[in-house]
Amino acid sequence: MDKTVVELFAGVGGFRVGLNDVTLNKNGEITENNRYTFVWANQWEPSSKIQHAFDCYIKRFGESESHVNEDISKINKHDIPNHTLLVGGFPCQDYSVARSLSKEKGIEGKKGVLWWEIYKTLEAKKPPFVLLENVDRLLKSPSKQRGRDFGIMLRTLNDLGYGVEWRVINAAEYGFAQRRRRVFIFAFKNNTEYFKSVYRLEANVFLTDRSMFAKSLPVVSIGKTETLDISKNKFSDLVKVSDDLAFKFDNSGFAINHTIITAKATPAVEAPITLGEIIETTKVDDHFYLSDEKLAKFKNLRDSKKIERTNKETGISYFYSEGSMSPHDLLTLPARTMLTSEGSVNRSTHIIKDPHNHHKMRLITPEEAERLNGFPTGWTNTGMPEKRRYFMMGNALVCDVVNRLSKQLDIIFENEK
C-alpha cells in the first residue's frame, strides 16, 4: 500500500517533520526522506489576518496547489485527494450534538466544528488509517459530563467502520526533552489487514504487546480494564451518546465494533533529554536576560497565593489558590509543558540560570523552544515575530513522538495488500 498523507490543521508541519525525518541546514534548506508522500495539507487560522503558521509551512515545504490556506469548513471534502493516512492535531472543543431542525438531516454537531470536519473528510475519502493528536483533557471533557466528547468521537469513528486505539503519551517518559502529555488516536478501517490481525485479541494482549502504540512506546503493565457498550443497543444514536454518556477513560484503550475497553498503562520509562542538553552552548542575545523588574514579576507569579474571588454569576465568594513554583527551571530535568504564552511574563514561562553567562536568569530562546518539540533549530525563523514563534511551539506536537510512531506505521503499511 502506498503511503500518501493528508494533513489537516497542519500548523507549522509537525506531523510531516516527524513522519519524514525532516532536517534543516544553516541555509534554510530542508532534507526530507519522503517515506510518506504528502498529497494535501490545510492550515487556516481564523483569528489571524497574517497566516504565520501557513507561511512557515510553505516556506519550508514550498508553495503548491496542494498546500491550502482556506477555512476547512468551506472545502468540499470530495475534492481532497485520495490518501491512505489522514493526520491532524485538532483543537479540543465541545463535541456535543443535537437533532437538526430538519429531521431529514439527522443529527449535527453544535460545537467542536473542527472535529466534524475530520468526520466529513473520513466519510468522503475513507482513508484506511488515521493518526490524530489532542490535549489529554479531551478524555475528561466536558467537566459536567466526563468522557462525553471522547465517547462521541469513538462512536462516530466506529460508525464509519474504523477501529480505534489511543494512548496518552508524556514525551519525557520516552526519552524526549519535554514533559508534554498529549493523547494520540490511531484509527484503522475494518477491511485492513491490521484490523483483522488485532480485533479478536484479548485486551491485555492488545494494550501491552500488539497495539501500534505498545509496539512503538512500550508499557510494562496495564491496570484493571473497564468496558463500555456504545452500540445502538445502548445508545440509539449520537444524540443519546451526547445526552447520556459519561465514562472514565484511562490513558490507554481501544474501541472496536462499538465496544470500548480502557485501562491505565504504565510506561516503560526511558531516560529523558534534559533542558540543559538542549539550551545554547554560548551566551544568547541580551534581550532574553531578565531585568530586576521582570524577575520581581516572575517571583510574584511563581509564589504561592490564596486570593478571594467572587463568582460573577452567583455572587458567591471563593478562594483561588496556587502552590509555589521554583524560581527557575532545573537544567537537570526535562522541560515542563510549553504553552502558547511561552516567552511572555506568565507563570508557565520557562526561566533558566544560564551556565554560559554567570548563571544570569533568562528566558529560553525560540530556537530552544523548537528543539523541545523536536523541530529543527530555526524552523519558525521565517519572518514571523518572536512572540508568534513561541506561540507556534506552544501549539505544536512533539515531532519525536510522531517519528517513533512512524517506525511501526511503516510496518503496518508494509503488511497491507
Image: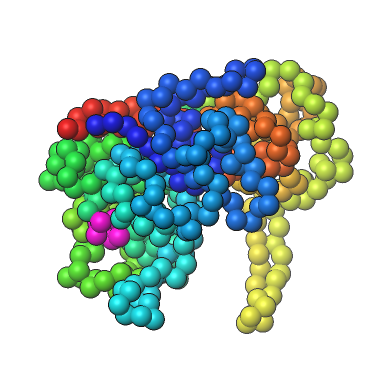
Asked if the magenta segment contains residue 159, the reply would be: yes
Which residue is at 44% across, 40% downward?
40
Percent from the top left, x then y, of residue 172?
Answer: 48, 34
Q: Percent from the top left, x then y, of residue 392?
A: 61, 41
Report the colour scheme.
rainbow
Measuring 58% from the left and 41% from the top, which residue is drawn there? 54
User: Which residue does the image show at 32% across and 54% down from the upper left?
Assistant: 124
List the single residue furthest toward the left. 200
State which quadrant residue 152 falls in: bottom left
Work out whether residue 3 or residue 412 is closer to the camera in this orientation and state it.
3
Q: On screen, 160 above or below 401? A: below
- Which range is magenta? 154-160
Tell me the quarter of the image containing the C terminus. Answer: top left
Vertical comparison of 195 with 46: above or below: above
In the picture, measured across the screen, residue 69 lies left or right of residue 211, that is right
Rendering quarter of residue 207: top left
Residue 406 to residue 73: above or below: above
Looking at the image, which is closer to me, 115 or 213? 115
Would you say 406 lies left or right of 278 here? Answer: left
- Residue 161 location (% of width, % of height): 22, 53
Magenta stretch, overall SS: helix
Question: Is residue 16 at least partly visible in the picture?
Answer: yes
**Residue ID at (23%, 27%):** 414
Whether residue 225 is visible? no
Examine the structure image and report whether residue 409 is included in the region drawn in magenta: no
Total numbered circles: 0
Residue 61: image location, x then y, percent: 53, 30
If the image is split into quadrants, where does the N terminus sit? top left
